[in-house]
Amino acid sequence: MYKFKILNKNLLKQIIVSFIMICVLSCSSDQGRSNCMPRSYVNARYSLNTPQLIPLQSPMGYVVLNPDGTNGGRGLIIVNTGARFLAYDRNAPQICPMAKSTLEVVDDIKVVCPENGAEWMLNTGMPINSATNGVPLYQYAVQQERNFIVIFN
């Protein structure tokens, strides 16, 4: 009976240590994003019939919007993937904001950070090269309401 109590104490210690390790290792929720990336309030509604947004009527069509007070500090990149609309923040998520860290679309297929050459796929927001530090683009929620899209956080 004495051996049983020792085994239980050892097993209990292992369980406690395992639980603590799981808690510590799962505490990160930033997905590797820069801690200084600004979190802007976004609440924008756009008509898909607006001349500037006509490209969104086609699959893989996209628009790059400059800030207007409703769509973040540096604006948005909106893309029609063919299945849904995605909206990305134009702040580079992997580095602190700098003069040249506003994201741009290049060759109609990728998003690029001019500051360090980080690249992401336009249609998914997933990283292409190591300069992204494995961090995907920051996405906002998008809802389609007839001929309008609403983008918010």
Image: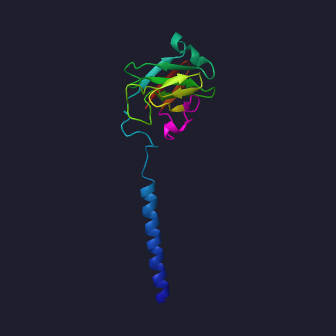
Relative to 135, residue 44 above or below: above
Q: Please provide percent x and percent y for residue 30.
A: 43, 43
Residue under the image location 40 percent in, 20 percent down: 67
The answer to whether one can see residue 50 in this image is: no
Q: Please provide percent x and percent y for residue 145.
A: 53, 23
- Which is nearer the eye, 92 or 88? 92
Among the 4 quarters of the image, the one containing residue 89: top left
Residue under the image location 46 percent in, 59 percent down: 22
**What secondary structure characterizes most of the magenta part?**
loop
Residue under the image location 47 percent in, 71 percent down: 14
- Which is nearer the eye, 78 or 44? 78
Residue under the image location 37 percent in, 25 percent down: 99
Farthest residue in the top direction? 51
Among the 4 quarters of the image, the one containing residue 122: top right
Viewed as shown, does residue 37 lie left or right of 4? Answer: left
Viewed as shown, does residue 93 lie left or right of 48? Answer: left
Farthest residue in the front direction? 116
Q: Please provide percent x and percent y for residue 60.
A: 61, 23
Instruction: Tell whether position 79 is magenta.
Output: no
The answer to whether one can see residue 62 in this image is: yes
Q: Report the label total.
A: 0
The stretch of residues the image draws in magenta is 120-138
Q: Quadrant of the C terminus?
A: top left
Viewed as shown, does residue 82 lie left or right of 35? Answer: right
Among the 4 quarters of the image, the one containing residue 127: top right
Q: Please provide percent x and percent y for residue 93.
A: 44, 35
